[in-house]
Amino acid sequence: MSPVETMRTVPARAPNGCNQPVMSQLTKAEREKVEQIAQLEMRSLSATARMLMLRGIQQYEDDTHNAD
């Protein structure tokens, strides 16, 4: 077998269209928490950060909607 035949394609880790990076600064403790979540969820750090951000946005929208 040639190396090309044994290579696997890497699955996309984010939906199509996810091409707008966001830079964020975390404390050491915050980063360690995100790393622990990433390991638990078996996700990359960036996929975990995206998941947490989307969940936070949803919570924010729910809270804002309920306040109205």
Image (cartoon, rainbow, N blue to C red):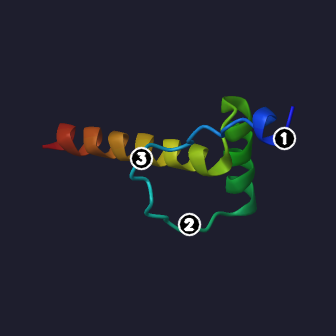
Q: Secondary structure at mark 1?
A: helix
Q: Label 1, on which residue? A: 3
Spatial distance from mark 1 to mark 2, Cα to Cα? 38 Å
Residue at (59, 43) in percent of width and height: 48
Q: Quadrant of residue 31?
A: bottom right
Tell me which amino acid carries mark 3.
Asn
Judge by depth and name the residue closer to the eye, 4 or 29: 4
- Give the image location of residue 44, x and y in percent: 67, 44
Spatial distance from mark 2 to mark 3, Cα to Cα? 22 Å
Q: Secondary structure at mark 2?
A: loop
* Marks 2,3: beta carbons within 8 A: no
Residue at (46, 49) in percent of width and height: 53
- Give the image location of residue 46, x and y in percent: 61, 51
Mark 1 or mark 2, whichever is nearer to me: 1
| Quadrant the C terminus occupies | top left
Mark 2 or mark 3, whichever is nearer to me: 3
